[in-house]
Amino acid sequence: MLRRDFLHHTSRAAAGALLASSGVAKRLAAVPALPQKFSAADTVTLGRTGIQTSRLAMGTGTVGVGHHSHQTALGIDGLSRLLLNGHDNGLRFFDAADSYGSHPHVADALKHLDRTKVTVLTKSWSRTAPEIRADLDRFRKELGTDHLDIVLMHCLTEGDWTTRYQPVMDVLSEAKQKGIIRAHGCSCHSIEALRAAAKSSWVDLDLARVNPVGAFMDADPDTVISVLRTMKSSGKAVIGMKILGQGTLRNRQDEALRFALGLGVLDAFSIGAESIAEQNDLMKRIAAA
């Protein structure tokens, strides 16, 4: 078994045990009613980037690894139709990544849309300047677009990543200056990397794992949320992911959604539906929250 697969299965088992604990049950039961109505299609502004898009991003990478995910398993036509269904319902935020293999699927959907009214986020595993330069060129070709709205350094775990990978950051800064991308940032997979992102003035946007039970997160919810509040207060955009704990909270979706919406720290959040019916149900749940 590959190390990443082992960690995934271990994390899922731990999350299942966590969800069964009385403490977690109390946390879920204590999620308060929201003081206002929300919609998946609400227009939000991502931090200080100036990018306006929908509150809900359409994720394309549930268990995304090796250029494959649950969403790309739908095929180019199937995932494209899922994205277009979301767009028909006001969703304007496409969450892609090289490691998910979802660029061709997003490109197919973009052929039918006004590119200027869609936000495309993607992610790179590159850790050297030549690699990220090549990725920026390849990603634009694969997505069929002349610019990328948001490019993130994917799955950072090192606490010193802001110095270790400075050459990558410099390339992305240059790309923003040239209009090749509109914003740059990171997705973190350790609390050390998340704290480094909070301190970095380079980070425009952070994609962070957050849910009420700590499933597949960088640390316990209180610790992570404290770091995210620091990010938010400094003007960074904070996008939530793992809102449903990668399926752990599939049967507690309403509580998980109320938790995310009520935090007051997420500009938007990404969830990957696997069918049009599931996507429509998710949008209804957000509206009912």
Image: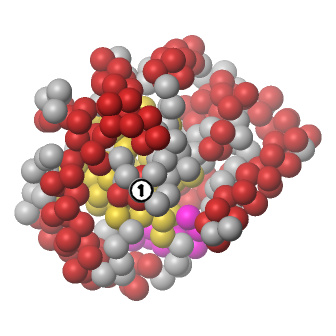
* 141 horizontally vs 162: left or right: left
Q: Is residue 2 above or below residue 258?
A: below
Observer-nearest of 9 and 123: 9
* 277 horizontally vs 216: left or right: left
Residue 195 shown in magenta: yes
Q: Is any atom of residue 43 visible in this view?
A: no
Residue 133 shown in magenta: no
Q: Which residue occupies 70% across, 50% down?
A: 215
Observer-nearest of 101 and 165: 101
* Residue at the disc numbered 1: 67
Residue with the most extreme bottom position: 164
Q: Which portion, as a residue range, is magenta?
A: 189-200
Q: Which residue occupies 56% across, 59% down?
A: 227
Q: Position of residue 103 (x, y in %)?
A: 29, 48
> Mostly what secondary structure, the magenta segment?
helix
The amino acid type, in three-letter code, at marker 1 is His
Observer-nearest of 189 and 44: 189
Q: Which residue occupies 42% across, 42% down?
A: 72
